[in-house]
Amino acid sequence: MNYDRINPELAQSLKNNPWLEIPYATLLENNPQQIRNLEASLAEQEATPKLPEGLAVENIFIPGLTTADPLVRLRIYKEKGSTNKPVLLYFHGGGFIFGNPEQSDELFYHLVLDSGYTVVSVAYRLAPESPFPAAIEDGYAALLWLANHGEEIGIDPQKIIVGGRSAGGALATALTHMARDNKGPQIHFQILSYPVTDYSCSTPSMLEFTDSPIWDYSSAKSSWKLYLEDHNLPVSPYASPLSAKDFSNLPPAFIMACELDPLRDEAIDYAQKLMQAAVAVELLVIPGAIHVFDVFPSSLSDQYYQTQLRILSSIFK
């Protein structure tokens, strides 16, 4: 891609960044588990973010969706002694193959204190060891647990929203379909950052960005192959939300897309599907931004953080 299109300050932040040296596309094709090892190694070399005063972080394990499923780990970020808080049920990114809740520790340390929300991040099962529908089943188990036991961690079970980035965005929005179809629990809002929504990898932006940083067409194709495994066509909307036939009666949404991201157009397409079904949507496309731009220091990242705070503060007013 033409790197001159990237926001200059963001481009400077990307220079010599070791995370960009991970060959995601090649490893997804040949050795996907190695990505986890490389990311863990890089994370160990970075300074551990300091836990702020007044914040508590704990990991709990809840039952899976069925008795045959393993326990699901939830990482909870909350103000000490908090009660009756709205909760963001969150799904990390990683192409359905890698990533973990801890990668967003620093973000949620600030977000909880600045927003007044409790955050519950799901350590869902990963492909290829656990392909679809394992991850979304873990997500639904987490939603059910919050609705039935949320008071145990100081949240209001009537004030649940969902969110996620990239593949986590796919899980968050697929969960809204599953909750609607099962007549609960109620989800009040969805916050989606550059979400994966379309298994076909056929949008103009996907076909344009075949050599973009972090994530490109080849990465997307390989991750879907690993996630869906032998899943038959048509693909379930609980895997690929844009495959749904019915977009009505879903929660209002805030959807962010990046101009220079192969996922750009499927995020926009999903927003349009919601709007056409009379679901309220705010869509933001950030110029000069690449996939996962907001994990790199820049004014774009700072501005997007403030945007998320604005959205969170508006939901239950």
Image: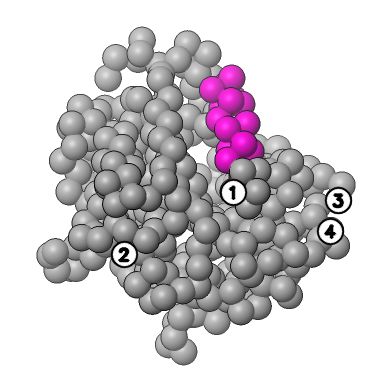
Amino acid carrying label 3: it is Gly
Would you say the residues marked 3 and 1 are in contact, meaning their CB atoms lie under 8 Å apart? no
Would you say the residues marked 4 and 3 are in contact, meaning their CB atoms lie under 8 Å apart? yes
Which residue is located at x 74 percent, y 57 percent?
Answer: 78
* Mark 4 or mark 3: whose residue is earlier in sequence: 3
Residue 4 higher or lower than 288, as above or below: above
Which residue is located at x 12 percent, y 65 percent?
Answer: 233
Q: Which residue is mark 4?
A: 80
C-alpha distance separating marks 4 and 2? 35 Å
The answer to which quarter of the image holds residue 44 is top right
Question: Which callout, 4 or 1, points to the residue nearer the camera?
Answer: 1
Amino acid carrying label 4: it is Lys
* Mark 4 or mark 2: whose residue is earlier in sequence: 4
Q: Which residue is mark 3?
A: 54
C-alpha distance separating marks 1 and 2? 25 Å
Disc ID at residue 171: none
Amino acid carrying label 1: it is Ile
Which residue is located at x 21 percent, y 56 percent?
Answer: 243
